[in-house]
Image (tube, rainbow, N blue to C red):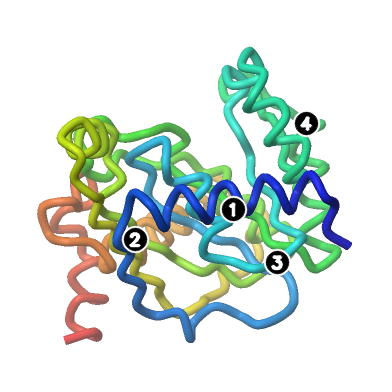
């Protein structure tokens, strides 16, 4: 059951986005209507995280939030109300990962940015293997999402001139990754991470592909999508 605090937090998010942005969403039919899954998206701005709560009307969303935001009272309140989890990005945070895995196994939604931090250029950076590890640990479906228009520099510039944001959310079809094979875990994690990132990249404009520009798997996916 959604708490009153969560209702207030989500209402604030909804009002803010309705006020400051025009949001175009494609592929909403690809979002599972029930059960646990992982949302994997690119990360280009501070608005990416709250956008999840605008998009998905579920009470069991787990967002992993950078530990630096614990220092800000408002973010501490919001993370607590929304039942998200602070995570140490620079050290193995076993406690946070256990919570995320437990909730995912229980049928919740886990939201991750494989790159681990915001891309200042707006282009995809090389991703870390954490998302592929968590997804294969449970065997959960992964829903790739490509975001544009939330870049911090764009947001600041537009709002400073009282112009609404134009946000685009492209949602791809869910897919699953095989279990990690015994004996070549690192190599498999690298392949799986590239698979996730290429599936995100195909949902973005060409000039956002960054590190994955020209990747053979990306070209294959582009061919499949026409």
Q: What element carries label 3?
A: loop
Q: How crowded is mark 4: few (under 14 residues within 10 Å), some or many (20 or more)?
A: few
> Which residue carries the number 4 mark?
94
Q: Marks 3 and 2, how far apart in space?
A: 20 Å
Instruction: Give the image location of residue 192, x and y in percent.
Output: 48, 58
Q: Marks 3 and 1, how far apart in space?
A: 12 Å
Instruction: Give the image location of residue 177, x and y in percent.
Output: 56, 69
Image quarter (top left, top right, bottom left or bottom right) of the N terminus:
bottom right
> Which residue carries the number 1 mark?
111
For the point 23% across and 84% down, the residue is 225
Give the mark, 1 or 4, whose residue is nearer the N terminus. 4
Give the mark, 4 or 3, whose residue is nearer the N terminus. 3
Q: Is mark 2 on a helix, strand or loop?
A: strand
Residue 4 seen in the figure: yes
Q: Marks 1 and 4, how far apart in space?
A: 17 Å
Q: Marks 2 and 4, how far apart in space?
A: 28 Å
Residue 188 seen in the figure: no
The single residue placed furthest to the right in the displayed view is 1
Tag in front: 4 or 3: 3
> Which residue carries the number 3 mark?
58
- Residue 146 — which label? 2
Q: What element carries label 4?
A: helix
């Amino acid at each position: 059951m959604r708490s009153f605090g969560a209702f207030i937090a989500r209402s604030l998010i909804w009002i803010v986005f309705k006020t400051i942005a025009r949001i175009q969403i494609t592929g909403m039919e690809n979002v599972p209507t029930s059960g646990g899954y992982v949302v994997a998206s690119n990360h280009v701005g501070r608005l990416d995280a709250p956008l999840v709560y605008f998009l998905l009307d579920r009470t069991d969303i787990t967002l992993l939030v950078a530990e630096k935001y614990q220092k800000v009272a408002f973010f501490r309140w919001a993370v607590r109300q929304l039942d998200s989890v602070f995570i140490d990005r620079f050290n193995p945070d076993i406690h946070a990962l256990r919570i995320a895995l437990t909730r995912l196994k229980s049928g919740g939604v886990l939201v991750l940015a494989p790159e681990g931090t915001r891309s200042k250029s707006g282009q995809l950076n090389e991703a870390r293997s954490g998302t592929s590890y968590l997804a294969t640990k449970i065997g959960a479906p992964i829903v790739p999402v490509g975001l544009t228009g939330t870049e911090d520099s764009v947001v600041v510039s537009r709002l400073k001139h009282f112009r609404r944001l134009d946000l685009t959310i492209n949602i791809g079809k869910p897919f699953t990754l095989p279990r990690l094979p015994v004996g070549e875990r690192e190599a498999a994690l690298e392949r799986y991470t590239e698979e996730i990132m290429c599936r995100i990249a195909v949902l973005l404009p060409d000039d956002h592909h960054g590190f994955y520009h020209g990747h053979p798997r990306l070209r294959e996916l582009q061919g499949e999508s026409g």
